[in-house]
Amino acid sequence: MISSQKIRPARPEDCSALTDLSLNSKAYWGYTDAFMLTCKPFLSITPKMITDWHSGVIETAEEIAGFYFLSEEQAQAELQLLYIDPSYIGCGYGRCLFNSAVETAIRLGHPNLRIEADPNAVGFYRKMGARQTGWCRSDISDGHELPLMILDLSKGAR
């Protein structure tokens, strides 16, 4: 298991690697090439995202294994992105990054964490203690909805 000391903030020079990782991670779930093309603008990491949002990057000796971005919009913490390189799924990196995002949201004084979850990630977020509270419109695909999940932060980090 990786320790939280190994998580660092994202840097502008990470944009290309983080974009590649997010696209590879999304594609892991078997989405079509056409859908992945539609996802690209939403999964492309920009210096503005790095400046505007809280982030965490976890590395191995060779490469970036995963990352998250957490925003504070409308006085609410929202997990914008959390992606793990497919070769590291099941190694504890997702849990470590999620816990770091939770700790950040708690430190910032938020009572809960909002997550618009990819349907393939719902099981992970449930294991982390989040519960589905409804549905929200997908920015990527018109007419599709995503599971809306909330994690109560009053219980502290997981």
Image (cartoon, grey):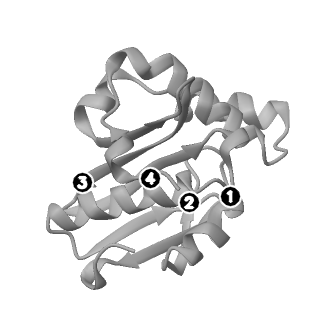
Report the side of 110 relative to 147 (left or right): left
**Dot 4: few (<14), some (14–19), or many (≥20) neighbours within 10 Å?**
many
- Secondary structure category for the residue under label 4: helix
In the visual, does 12 lie left or right of 26? left
Q: Amino acid at mark 2?
A: Arg
Numbered disc 1: secondary structure:
loop
Between marks 1 and 4, how big is the CA–CA gap? 27 Å
Instruction: Report the quarter where the C terminus lies.
Output: bottom left
The label on residue 144 is: 1
Amino acid type at circle 1 is His
The CA distance from mark 3 to mark 4 is: 17 Å
**Which residue shows up at 20% across the image and 69% down it?**
110
| Secondary element at tag 3 | strand
Q: Which residue is mark 2?
A: 137
Q: Nearer the viewer, mark 1 or mark 4?
A: 4
Q: Is 7 placed above or below 15 here? A: below
Tag 2–tag 1 contact (CB < 8 Å): yes
Mark 4–mark 2 distance (CA, rounded to whole Å): 25 Å
Q: Residue at x 59, y 35 (%)?
A: 22
Q: Dots 1 and 4: beta carbons under 8 Å?
A: no
**106 and 110: which is toward the camera:** 106
The CA distance from mark 3 to mark 1 is 24 Å
Q: Earlier in the sequence, mark 4 or mark 2?
A: 4
Q: CA distance from mark 2 to mark 1?
A: 6 Å
Residue on which disc 3 sits: 72
Residue on which disc 4 sits: 97
Label whose residue precedes the other's in the sequence (2 or 1): 2
Q: Which amino acid type is marked by label 4? A: Leu
Pointer 3 or 2: first along the chain = 3
Other-residue count near label 2 (Cα within 10 Å), few / some / many at <14 / 14–19 / ≥20: some
Give the residue type at disc 3.
Answer: Glu
